Image (cartoon, rainbow, N blue to C red):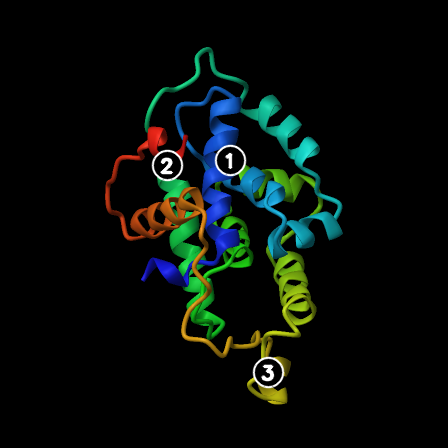
Amino acid sequence: MFERFTDEARQVVVLAQDEARELRHDYIGTEHLLLGLLREDGIAAGVLRGLNVTVDDVRGEVATIVGQGDEVTAGQIPFTPRAKKVLELGLREALSLGHNYIGSEHILLGVVREDDGVAARILHDSGLNSEMIRNEVIRKVGTHRESSWQLQSAPSVRRGRLPRRRSSYAPIGRDPRVLLAGWLLFAIALGIGIAIGWAIWG
C-alpha cells in the first residue's frame, strides 16, 4: 500500500529527518515536517511559497521557538505524537478529497489541521489559516497536474473536490532512499514501530 504515497511525500519524510538532525533535535515534530515540505519541490512547497512562506523564515522561527539541541542524534529519530497525527490526518485528507494517492499537499493539509503543533503556530503567526491554505492547495493541484489528471465532473470541482488520478496508485520512485522513506511514512501513519537503517542510505 505504501506505493500510494507519491515520491514527493516520501521525500518529505527524508528531508524532515535531515532537518531534525541539522537542528540537533532528538525527535521529528510538525515543524520538521513543515521544513521538509518547503524543501521538497512539490505542490506543498509551491503553495507555501505562493503564500510567502520560505524555508529560511520557518527555520529561523523553529530555532527561536524550540531552539537547537546540544548533540546530533545517532540512529533512529522518533516522530512525536503530533507529527504522527499529521501523517494520519494527511491520509484522511486524501480520502476525504476522493484521492487514491497521498501527496505532499495532503501532508500540508494535515499540518494545518493539527493546530496545536509548532508548524501550525508558525503558519498562524505568518497570518495564514487552514482555509487559506486549503483553497490554495485546491487551486494549485488543479493547475499543477492538469496534463496527467482528469476531472471527475464540473459539479465535483465546484464542491471543492480535487481531480482523481486515473491510475490506481502513484508511480513508485527508483531511488532506494525515497522508497524506504515511503515505507517508513506508511508504517508510521499506521502506528507501526520500525527502525530506520541509515547505513542503507549511504
Provide the residue designation for mark 3.
151
Hey, which residue is sitting farthest top in the picture?
70
Q: Quadrant of residue 43?
A: bottom right
Which residue is rendered at x = 31% and y = 33% of the image? 197
Question: How far is the residue under mark 1 from the one under mark 2?
Answer: 10 Å
Mark nearer the viewer, 2 or 3: 3
Q: Neighbour class for label 3 at 10 Å: few (<14), some, many (≥20)?
A: some
Local SS, label 3:
loop
Q: Answer yes or no: is residue 77 visible.
A: no
Of the two numbered discs 3 and 1 on the same chain, state the one appearing first in sequence: 1
Residue 189 screen position, x and y as percent: 33, 51
* Mark 3: amino acid: Leu
Provide the residue designation for mark 2.
79
Of the two numbered discs 1 and 2 on the same chain, state the one appearing first in sequence: 1
CB under 8 Å between callouts 1 and 2? no
Question: How far is the residue under mark 3 from the one under mark 1?
Answer: 33 Å
Provide the residue designation for mark 1.
32
Residue 159 screen position, x and y as percent: 59, 80
Question: How far is the residue under mark 2 from the one under mark 3?
Answer: 36 Å
Local SS, label 1:
helix
Hey, which residue is sitting farthest left in the picture?
193
